[in-house]
Image (cartoon, helix red, strand yellow):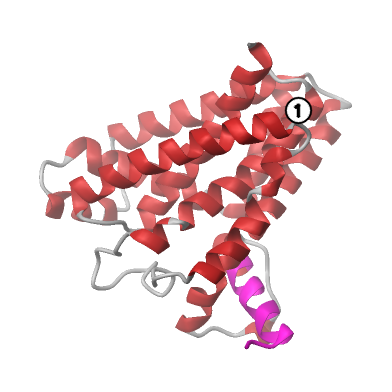
Amino acid sequence: MTRPADELRYFLTALGYFTRVPVPRWVGFEPHYLSAAARYFPLVGLMVGGIGALVYLAALHVFPAGVAVLLSMAATLVVTGAFHEDGLADCADAFGGAYTRDDALRIMRDSRIGAFGAIALVIALALKWQTLAALPPMRAVALMIAAHAASRAFAISYLLTLDYVRAEGKAKPVAQRMSIASFALAALCGLPWLFWPDWRLGCVAVAVLVVVRLAIGRYFVRRIGGYTGDCLGFAQQLFELAVYLTGLGWISS
């Protein structure tokens, strides 16, 4: 049984790994911290979504909704260092431009961005912008918070079922098989926000995310035999978009 001080260390490790937020020196770093910290990734997402929502609400007092959404997106990108967007671009380049597993893994490690990656980033950011700008303000706030938290919970669910395919890598310390108990805590941190303020929309969103998760997971296994750190970022971005699009579809129907 871990001590509360250890759990705090693991949360701060997650915060330092996935954001640019400075953490106290006493947290330190050991590889096993990251494995234990995985259960707190949705809680980090909740904080990122909260920052985006606060910037959006503040900007709405001065700017139109479209500009307010862009400013909130910029805030989340600054806070996270575009960590997950980088994974989206790397995977789009790899899966779009490679024919073999080895080529895909090699392209993912290339720091340069290609045409597929650039196109994927433009489309993803444009979809987020337009979808959130089309929503009523308080609904947009709720979905920002829910999407950032839930998307990370679903992304790390692959740690339960898939294998990490690299012998070494930046995500290797994170990419350990997650226990059911750890994932239950992650789900508790990330999923309830989908049901506020409309539980029916939450049920639909969870169903959509489950379908998307199964489809992405099967694709990862078929293309490279499992996942990499970039794959988790790629999945997080698609899950986040799925929440926004589901919310807009629910409102429009």
The residue closer to the viewer here, 43 or 253, is: 253
Seen as rendered, the residue at the extreme top is 253
The magenta stretch spans residue 14: yes
Q: Residue at x 81, y 22 (%)?
A: 63
Instruction: From this view, report whether residue 207 is shown above or below residue 220.
Output: above
Instruction: Count the numbered circles shown.
Output: 1
Q: Is residue 2 visible?
A: yes
Q: Residue at x 24, y 40 (%)?
A: 95
Image quadrant assignment for residue 68: top right
Q: Residue at x 42, y 36 (%)?
A: 211
The magenta region covers: 1-15
Determine whether, in the image, residue 128 is placed left or right of residue 237. right
Check disc 1 and report the residue beneath it.
139
Q: Position of residue 16 (x, y in %)?
A: 60, 68
Which three-letter amino acid code belongs to the residue tagged 1? Arg
Instruction: From this view, report whether residue 1 is shown above or below residue 100.
Output: below
Quadrant that contains the N terminus? bottom right
The residue closer to the viewer here, 78 or 136, is: 136
Q: Position of residue 232 (x, y in %)?
A: 41, 53
Q: Position of residue 233 (x, y in %)?
A: 44, 50
Q: Residue at x 23, y 72 (%)?
A: 167
Image quadrant assignment for residue 44: bottom right
Main SS of the magenta part reads helix
Instruction: From this view, report whether residue 226 is shown above or below residue 213.
Output: below
